[in-house]
Amino acid sequence: MNILLGVTGSIAACKAPLLVRGLVKAGHTVQVVLTAGGAQFTTALTLSTLSRRPVLTEFVTNAATGEWANHVELGLWADLLLIAPASADTVARLANGHCRSLLDGVYLSARCPVALAPAMDLDMYAHPAVQANFERLRSYGNHVIEAATGELASGLVGQGRMPEPEELVAWVGRFSIE
């Protein structure tokens, strides 16, 4: 499968390299779209090395030559758009049709299935506004992968952890069979 992997601003973005490695090892072609927030927790160099493809971060990739990342083309290329981790901010933007980043534009123009693996603190995850955004995304036909329960970066324990990379690779494997 051709997988677009959106990596957003969450401490769980530190798991993205292991996720990319697992997806590639499973035989998938992975194109990473890294948000500015995601880049605070992992690097484009690491993700491009593991995916063997340049990481996309902005609509315009070279202003001097007019090169740009065609969000429509990306959405047509992909068999699956997986956003992992999906931060509360990203979830809210996607649920409400906002387009502030390349990832938002790819999501809004994607014709492929979309799956989101949320990662946020337990009170954020449980907040009625966030849960309403998950429901809205599901109503659009998206898959929201339940967050795992365990120790969170805040030190609290509860639901909000992004599933481990091997669990997400297994989810993609089950999804591709369906």
Image (cartoon, helix red, strand yellow):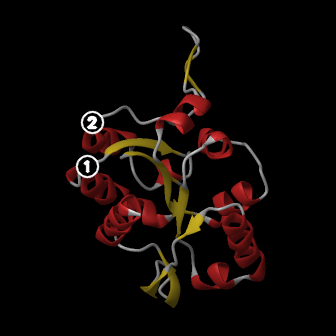
Amino acid carrying mark 1 in the image:
Val
**SS at mark 1?**
helix
Horizontally, is 3 left or right of 49 in the view? right
Using the rendered view, name the quadrant where residue 2 is placed.
top left
* Upstream in sequence: badge 1 or badge 2: 1
Estimate the x, y position of residue 70 in percent, counting from the top left. Answer: 57, 26
Q: Mark 1 touching mark 2, by CB under 8 A?
A: yes
Estimate the x, y position of residue 9 in percent, counting from the top left. Answer: 55, 57
Query: Where is mark 2, residue-wise?
Result: 52
On residue 131, which mark appears?
none
Is residue 7 shown above or below 78? Answer: below
Query: Where is mark 1, residue-wise?
Result: 24
Residue occupying the far bottom of the picture = 157
Horizontally, is 141 left or right of 30 in the view? right
Horizontally, is 64 left or right of 19 in the view? right
Q: Which of 41 and 12 is in front in this view?
A: 12
Estimate the x, y position of residue 177 in percent, counting from the top left. Answer: 35, 62
Is residue 76 shown above or below 145? Answer: above
Q: Which residue is drawn at 66% across and 62% down?
A: 91
